[in-house]
Image (cartoon, helix red, strand yellow):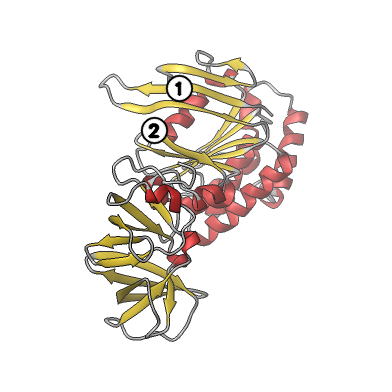
Amino acid sequence: MATVRLDRVRKVYPNGHIGVAGASFEIADGELLVLVGPSGCGKTTLLRMIAGLESISDGTLSIDGRVVNDVAPKERDIAMVFQNYALYPHMTVAENLGFGLRLRGHKPAEIEQRVRGAAKTLELEQRLDSRPAALSGGQRQRVALGRALVRDPKVFLLDEPLSNLDAKLRLSMRVEIARLHRQLRATMIYVTHDQVEAMTLGQRIVVLDGGVIQQIDTPMNLYERPANLFVAGFLGSPSMNLLPGTLRTGNGLRLVTAQGDIALGSVRQAGALERRLDREIVLGVRPEDLHLLDAGTDAALEARLEVIEPVGNEVFLNLRYGNQALVARTPPRPLPEPGSTLQFGFASERLHFFDPVQGERIAAAD
């Protein structure tokens, strides 16, 4: 396996559009790193530059210490798994798995050994004589993974490999990929727009928007300490509630919004916030941190219940706080009819605060 290092890598198209703006990070040997962001954010462009399928406008890309900016894709010792499987329909599973090895001139005995090893790892031993049309979507994706696996490359690149699968298959294939990574201890770079895939698979995650890296961190650090408003709103399902207002004091810190005052309590960021008194900020509250209170309880805010979404072991409450939409996540419990006014509180230590202009997180140390 290998390390991959990007140093101020840029992609600028002939029309002046910036696909990737100055990406700098390193993927450790054996790490599974996820590139995530909305459509058009530059994640696939970045992956294709690592693969050599897209030229680099500026900066340096190194694989295992070797600069590969001008190295042909076939000489980079990488294997790529595409979104659409890219299997040859007239070939059997065994032939698809071994095709790349045959092109590289490997001996038939070695090809058979590697193909059978990959088939065993991916539980495809009984389907080696089948053609892609006879396989399920999950099995086809396993063949695509196996075709990369037999190569034994330095780096695996996976470009939204699960996007064509249904929800149940995506779940099982996520587990499959995580198991495969743990077994191989391989260096993997995985592109997805699905935050659930990113959070469950990535040891670290690179969040992109508009070709710019917004934050690089572990899944839990991204979730618990988003660096800016974009990351806060993008990661989380449902996404974080964001409430703009003006910070005031008087009986403790409070946020004055168009809908009313919200008492903030003893927040960890008190020192940093006091330096922002009488200025606009954005309060962030995760849906699971917005707690439904009993009627008559002293509440941080009151909101009208609009829609109830039961999803099995929890319930999403879609709320209206003045003209602001909010979502609360609660355990299943008896609830009043939509249209009712409910009281909510929150744990002050779980609140997030952001600068509305720069979008950056207001941290206790700033």
* x and y, in percent, of residue 214 in the image: 42, 38
- State the residue at coordinates (71%, 49%): 125
Eyeballing the image, is 149 above or below 303? above
Asked if residue 303 lies left or right of residue 141, the reply is: left
Q: How busy is the neighbourhood of tag 2: few (under 14 within 10 Å), some, or many (20 plus)?
A: some
Left or right: residue 15 versus residue 89 is left
Q: CA distance from mark 1 to mark 2?
A: 11 Å
Q: Residue furthest front?
A: 250
Q: From the viewer's perspective, is residue 43 above or below residue 58?
A: below
* Amino acid type, residue under disc 1 in the picture: Val
Label whose residue precedes the other's in the sequence (1 or 2): 1
Give the camera-side residue of 286 and 277: 277
Which amino acid does the dot numbered 2 rest on? Answer: Val
**Secondary structure under badge 2?**
strand
Q: Residue at x 68, y 45 (%)?
A: 180
Q: Label 2, on which residue?
A: 212
Q: Is residue 95 visible?
A: no
Tell me which corner region of the image, top left, top right, bottom left or bottom right, holds residue 366.
Answer: top left
Q: Which mark is residue 105?
A: none
Q: Position of residue 61 (x, y in %)?
A: 53, 20
Could you tell me if the residues under marks 1 and 2 are in contact, i.e. CB atoms within 8 Å?
A: no
What x and y, as percent, mark residue 193?
43, 46
In the image, residue 29 sits, relative to residue 336, either above or below, namely above
Across and down, in percent, residue 262 comes to 33, 66
How dense is the environment of label 1, judged by Cα within 10 Å: few (below 14), some, or many (20 and up)? many
Local SS, label 1: strand
Q: Is residue 246 left or right of residue 275?
A: left
Q: Which residue is mark 1?
A: 9
The quarter holding residue 238 reads: bottom left
